[in-house]
């Protein structure tokens, strides 16, 4: 005997949870399958998100953003980008007529709030802890069998289960991975000088270093660097790591004190052949994975959830949410932006990893020329913060 639902979401992370919450006023019955509930880190979480204003508005519409602890969120008002040979590009929310460029918050903070909303949502049934074991798709429905033997029959299954998506594999959707042979090293520090809500990014010979402001004059570092360099950073004791990171940023924020130990994760580009099939859709990292230099990964996932919720929520009662024609509307809505971000970040990563002196001069000249043209610079900012990512 199977429990019946209109929609079964595999993965209760940010993309999957936000999709379910976005459908809270719909007629759809929803199952969310997740291995474990989110856990708030003790102290500060080493993994943080840069949430665009457009996605803060999306989350505010879900009723989640306004319930976050304001003392754990930091607005970004300015950003300084440095090339590897004297190039510089500055962005300002004030100069662009904006309230902020982005919001920085911990990974677990938003997930915990969305999860609390899910637990109270009348049309959601949580299966947690639970893991899928088998997926059978046919013309009429999808049957999702869990490891504990329970069976869920749904008209649509959504894979929101990350870059190594089980749902995607079960559906036979090919994913092509391109390893960067790099790791992202993350850690949090207390700054010796005020960061003034400014984000910094350096394109260096040994990778891309980003400093993201956090409340209480803390800073979150993301250093995308070749594997060997990453292992060196991870092997440093706290004092040595503080000195290395401060030096890499030219001492702009003074001496550092380590707040959260360093962690590392491998970086790779992922492209999928398609994001929908009969009775199946992919969102978030299950549908696309990009280099973290843009800071837009989670924003793409939120916009996937928004777009799919809009398509499903607009269907008349007689329409089947799992029919391919309806799902193709979602795929079309999300065809351009993830592809653009994937190729842009991939190209930037390759451009600044090339040691050719002529290319180095050209890329740094490009940064300086853009910086000298306020109209172009501010247009880039407005597009980034008010667009669909």
Image: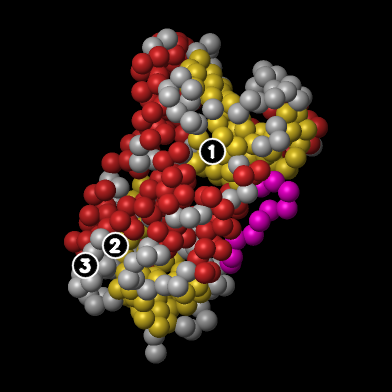
User: Who comes first in sequence, dot 1 or dot 3?
Assistant: 1
Question: Neighbour class for label 2 at 10 Å: few (<14), some, many (≥20)?
Answer: many
**Which residue lies under the disc numbered 3?**
316
Q: Position of residue 1 (x, y in %)?
A: 39, 89
Q: Is residue 151 above or below residue 119?
A: below
Would you say 240 lies left or right of 54 here? Answer: right
Magenta-drawn stretch, dominant element (helix, strand or loop): loop
Q: Which residue appears at 57% of the width and 72% of the height?
A: 129
Of the 4 image quadrants, the one containing the C terminus is top left
SS for dot 1: strand
Q: Is residue 37 magenta?
A: yes
Q: Image quadrant of residue 299? A: top left
Measure how far apart labels 1 and 3 are at the Cα level.
36 Å
Q: Position of residue 115 (x, y in %)?
A: 54, 62
Q: Which mark is residue 273?
A: none
User: Who comes first in sequence, dot 1 or dot 2?
Assistant: 1
Would you say 266 lies left or right of 351 here? Answer: right
**Which residue lies under the disc numbered 1?**
103
Q: Is residue 359 above or below residue 297?
A: above
Q: Which residue appears at 39% of the width and 85% of the height?
A: 2
Question: Neighbour class for label 3 at 10 Å: few (<14), some, many (≥20)?
Answer: few
**Which residue lies under the disc numbered 2?**
312
SS for dot 3: loop
Q: Is residue 368 magenta?
A: no
């Amino acid at each position: 005997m199977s429990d019946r639902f209109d929609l079964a979401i595999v993965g209760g992370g940010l993309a999957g949870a936000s999709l379910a919450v976005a459908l809270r006023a719909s007629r759809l019955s929803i199952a969310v399958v997740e291995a474990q509930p989110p856990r708030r880190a003790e102290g500060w979480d080493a993994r943080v998100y840069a949430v665009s204003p457009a996605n803060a508005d999306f989350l505010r519409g879900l009723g989640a953003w306004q319930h976050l602890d304001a003392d754990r969120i930091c607005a970004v008002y300015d950003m300084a980008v440095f090339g590897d040979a004297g190039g510089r590009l500055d962005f300002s929310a004030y100069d662009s007529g904006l309230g902020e460029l982005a919001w920085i918050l911990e990974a677990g903070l938003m997930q915990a709030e969305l999860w609390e909303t899910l637990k109270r949502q009348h049309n959601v049934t949580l299966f947690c802890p639970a893991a899928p074991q088998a997926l059978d798709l046919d013309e009429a429905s999808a049957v999702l069998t869990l490891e504990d033997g329970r069976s869920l029959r749904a008209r649509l299954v959504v894979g929101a289960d990350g870059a190594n998506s089980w749902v995607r594999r079960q559906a036979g959707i090919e994913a092509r991975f391109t390893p960067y042979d790099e790791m992202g090293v993350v850690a949090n520090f207390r700054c010796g000088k005020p960061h003034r809500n400014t984000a910094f990014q350096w394109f260096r010979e040994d990778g891309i270093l980003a400093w993201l402001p956090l409340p209480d004059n803390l800073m979150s570092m993301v250093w995308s660097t070749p594997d060997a360099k990453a292992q060196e950073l991870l092997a440093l004791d706290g004092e040595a790591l503080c000195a290395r990171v401060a030096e890499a940023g030219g001492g702009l924020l003074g001496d550092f004190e380590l707040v959260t130990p360093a962690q590392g994760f491998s970086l790779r580009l992922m492209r999928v052949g398609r994001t929908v099939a009969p009775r199946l859709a992919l969102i978030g990292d299950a549908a696309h994975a990009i280099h973290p230099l843009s800071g837009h990964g989670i924003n793409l996932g939120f916009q996937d959830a928004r777009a799919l919720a809009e398509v499903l929520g607009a269907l008349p009662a007689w329409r089947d949410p799992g029919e391919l024609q309806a799902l193709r509307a979602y795929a079309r809505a999300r065809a351009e932006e993830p592809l653009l971000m994937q190729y842009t970040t991939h190209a930037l990563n390759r451009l600044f990893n090339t040691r050719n002196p002529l290319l180095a001069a050209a890329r740094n000249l490009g940064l300086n020329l853009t910086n000298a043209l306020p109209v172009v610079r501010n247009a880039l900012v407005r597009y980034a913060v008010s667009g669909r990512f």
